Image: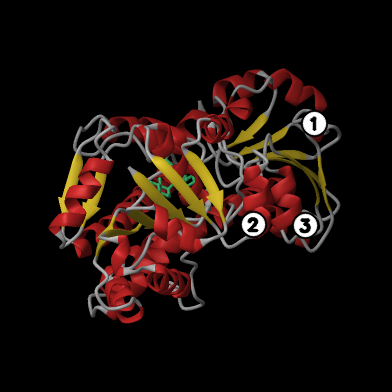
């Protein structure tokens, strides 16, 4: 099928590429000329495992094209995806101005001669946005234009976006238009995944409700971790024990510094705002946010407890990205922690396998922060090691080398990556989250 994706951000670029990979002809549109030129040169503006090779292969095969012209995209695509940013506003509600603008632009390019078009919202949007898109297109399109509007939320995770797109747990297609639903089902035929067809409002709600539930799982286990600490229990065992219940599951029960990234913090805030605007306040989610924010502060207190003061201390920081396998530092707890430590007078020397460049560009550090691409070099003469991101290379670190290089053998593991008994054997003083039972043994 011929499809168009408007917006070549994370979701637009990766989903467009994967649609091309399964055999569709895809035109990706972006109004950022520089970005399109970069993509036309075969360069990818983000770090996402496997994506660069896939873009190249599909551009070479002629199934994936890039352009700045919305008109070309609307002409060539029977199905037109909107995948533009939906940033938060200061009150937590979603800024839908990019969606509105693209809906208008699409409308202005539509003509009755083009025939029926499906307009799909892939960006994460509040419930009832589809209705607004429909109204807007109807208002700005010439008379006689035929179209249907669909919500098709995207559930990809950064760091494994290609895998998530090619092999999703489920595909959600929401529309009140039968013709649009039939075309969408045809589009997804090459994918081996269950398809859930719903009305448009339910599809929009599924995305916010799913992300909020995952964030709730994380805050839940973090609250349990704090109880474990106070009662000398081990949160890893507790998570294993509750996760063995098939109704609960072990995934997203990793206690640590809490969630960050471009989705969870924004989506939880948006869902709170949406529920309030509908007169159904969802206060449980406020508690999820509160626990998440406290997690970093509690951890910093733990470090202060041992170091006494940050001033003039050299801190080796392992991790800048908001999670492993990405260079994304948006809403990264690692970055937020580094800022507090700097503010309190510490010298921070940071390592990250992918996110040093993005941290330099977007970290907005007021003080000086040093970076090293060598995780062990960060430790030389440092007063403590702080682990903030769950990269596998940190989990597999050489503990003897850590002990040898640190000035004082203090390790604060904000992601529970290391084994407490092993750290003890290596002569390290080790602090983690919710594993008091193991620390005490
Ligand atoms: C998330 C959703 O998983 C995805 O479905 C949606 O489309 C976008 O938002 P993403 O933000 O890429 O994806 O990352 P995810 O793997 O969900 O992790 C989010 C945050 O939660 C990270 O900061 C991670 O460190 C943290 N996390 C995750 C935990 O603290 N504990 C866990 O058990 C899992």
Residue 191 seen in render: yes
**Tag 2's secondary structure?**
helix
Closer to us: 125 or 1: 1
* Horizontal and vertical percent position of residue 29: 51, 55
Mark 2 neighbour density, 10 Å: few (under 14) some (14–19) many (20 or more): some
**Tag 1's secondary structure?**
loop
Closer to us: 356 or 434: 356
Instruction: Name the quarter where the N terminus is drawn.
Output: top left
Q: Is 95 rendered above or below residue 7?
A: below
Q: In which quarter of the image is residue 429?
A: top right
Q: Mark 3 points at which residue?
A: 342
Q: First in sequence, mark 2 or 3: give its number.
A: 2
* Horizontal and vertical percent position of residue 146: 24, 67
Quadrant of the rendered image holding ligand 1? top left
Asked if residue 253 lies left or right of residue 169, the reply is right
Q: First in sequence, mark 2 or 1: give its number.
A: 2
Q: Name the residue under label 2.
A: 336
Asked if residue 170 lies left or right of residue 225, the reply is left
* Horizontal and vertical percent position of residue 127: 27, 68
């Amino acid at each position: 099928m011929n499809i168009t994706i408007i917006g070549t951000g994370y979701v637009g670029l990766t989903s467009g590429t994967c649609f091309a990979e399964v055999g569709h002809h895809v035109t990706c549109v972006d109004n950022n000329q520089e970005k399109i030129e970069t993509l036309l040169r075969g360069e990818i503006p983000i770090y996402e495992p496997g994506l660069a090779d896939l873009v190249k292969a599909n551009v070479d095969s002629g199934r994936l094209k890039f352009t700045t012209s919305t008109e070309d995209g609307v002409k060539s695509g029977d199905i037109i995806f909107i995948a533009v940013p939906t940033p938060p506003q200061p009150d937590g509600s979603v800024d839908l101005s990019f969606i509105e603008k693209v809906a208008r632009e699409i409308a202005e390019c539509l003509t009755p001669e083009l025939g029926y078009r499906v307009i799909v919202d892939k960006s994460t949007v509040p419930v009832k946005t589809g209705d607004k898109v429909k109204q807007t297109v109807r208002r700005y399109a010439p008379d006689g234009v035929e179209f249907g509007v669909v919500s098709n939320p995207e559930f990809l995770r950064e760091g494994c976006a290609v895998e998530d797109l090619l092999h999703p747990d489920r595909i959600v297609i929401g529309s009140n238009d039968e013709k649009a639903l039939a075309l969408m089902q045809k589009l997804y035929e090459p994918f081996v995944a269950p398809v859930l067809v719903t009305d448009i409002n339910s599809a929009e709600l599924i995305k916010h409700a799913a992300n909020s539930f995952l964030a709730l799982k994380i805050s839940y286990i973090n609250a349990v971790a704090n109880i474990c600490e106070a009662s000398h229990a081990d949160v890893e065992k507790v998570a294993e024990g509750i996760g063995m219940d098939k109704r609960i599951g072990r995934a997203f029960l990793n206690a640590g510094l809490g969630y960050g990234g471009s989705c969870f913090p924004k989506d939880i805030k948006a869902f709170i705002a949406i529920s309030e605007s509908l007169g159904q306040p969802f206060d449980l989610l406020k508690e999820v946010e509160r626990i998440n924010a406290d997690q970093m502060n509690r951890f910093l207190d733990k470090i202060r407890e041992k170091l006494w003061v940050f001033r003039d201390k050299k801190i080796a920081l392992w991790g800048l990205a908001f999670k492993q396998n990405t260079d994304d530092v948006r809403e990264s707890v690692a970055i937020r922690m580094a800022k507090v430590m700097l503010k309190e007078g510490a010298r921070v020397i940071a390592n990250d396998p992918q996110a040093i460049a993005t941290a330099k560009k977007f970290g907005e550090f007021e003080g000086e922060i040093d970076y090293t691409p060598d995780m062990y070099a960060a430790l030389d003469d440092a007063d403590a090691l702080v682990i903030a991101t769950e990269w596998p290379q940190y989990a597999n670190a050489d503990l003897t080398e850590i002990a040898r290089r640190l000035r004082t053998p203090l390790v604060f593991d904000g992601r529970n990556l290391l084994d407490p008994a092993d750290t003890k054997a290596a002569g390290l003083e080790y602090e983690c989250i919710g594993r008091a039972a193991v620390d005490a043994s």
